[in-house]
Amino acid sequence: MAPFSLAALTVLELAPPALIDVAAACGYDHVGLRLLPAVPGGIAYPLMDNEAELKETIARLDATGITVADLEVVAFSPDTEIASFSAFFETGARLGAKHILVAAYDPDLDRFTDRYAKFCQAAALYGLTADLEFMPWTYVPDLATANRIVAQIGQANAGVLVDALHFDRSKSLIEELARVPVQRLHYWQLCDGPAERPATTEEMIHAARHERLFPGEGGIDLRALTRAMPKDIVVSIEVPTAGLEKTVDAKMRAQRALDAARRVIDAAHDRS
């Protein structure tokens, strides 16, 4: 079975050391850590600015055997400067991270593409991939656009990040996944959502950031998507459930997410 990672967004109330302990207790293999906010003022745990918490996080990794799959979120804006990420890269290397989630909030795609290429070059020096996540409300709204940009820059560590919710909401096609070279797929994100797509962009963003469904509990064709993805890459389980968070603790939500994901993966590959 593919290795599973507990995405930061699933239990965003937890700082990295607590996130790692929950992941270990539930049976995850990896974690994703949010060192930079998805939006200005959003929740994040900037370990590059907190040496004590960084050391505690590394200690929890060592003690549990959990490893870091990915770091979030490098959200490119028009004024993003590659030089500003030196401490972020160094921290990623100290954590033993493998991947970085990149998102495009720059309307000038030529400028974004140029900076993304330079970002990949910088990340490669630290053994990190840079994985471009397409989201319908960003300037890389679908799989086809992400794959085109990653192909254009020609960087070996550039990747396309497939999120099950964004894949469905962007109306990307399983057939398009076949055109993505397997070496560009480093990990992917699993969740579920209602079959009916949100009526507005605002509703789509809110659902994606705060109210997803556990795998197999919605209407997205996760079996087809699972079959189309490489079997051996990390499955990051990203299921924010803000409403449930009020009454169910992080460990219980993380366990429910992992159990649900395992059932989906098993069913997709016809395992009992």
Image (tube, rainbow, N blue to C red):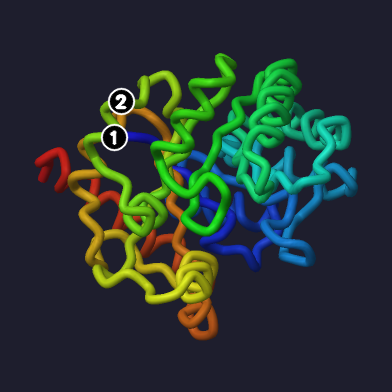
Q: Is residue 41 left or right of residue 227?
A: right
Q: How crowded is mark 2: few (under 14 residues within 10 Å), some or many (20 or more)?
A: few
Task: Look at 89% across and 43% down and name the residue there.
Answer: 51
SS assignment at label 1 = helix
Looking at the image, is 128 positioned above or below residue 213? Answer: above
Which quarter shows the N terminus? top left
Depth check: 267 or 108 in front?
A: 108
**Can residue 149 be spotted in the picture?**
yes
User: What amino acid does circle 1 point to?
Assistant: Glu
Displayed quadrant of residue 85: top right
Residue at 86% from the left image edge and 34% from the top image edge: 87
* Percent position of residue 272, x then y: 10, 45
* Residue 136, x across and y down, in percent: 47, 56
Q: Can residue 73 be seen in this view?
A: no
Q: Which residue lies at the image location 38% right of the left edge and 54% below the top edge?
A: 170
Q: Do the residues labelled 2 and 1 touch (CB within 8 Å)?
A: yes
Q: Which residue occupies 80% across, 42% down?
A: 80
Residue that carries the numbered disc 1 in the rendered image: 176
Q: Which amino acid does label 2 sit on?
A: Arg
According to the image, label 2 marks what residue?
179
Does 97 appear above or below 77? above
Marks 2 and 1 sit apart, C-alpha to C-alpha, by 5 Å
Local packing at callout 1 (Cα closer than 10 Å; few below 14, some 14-19, many 20+) is: few
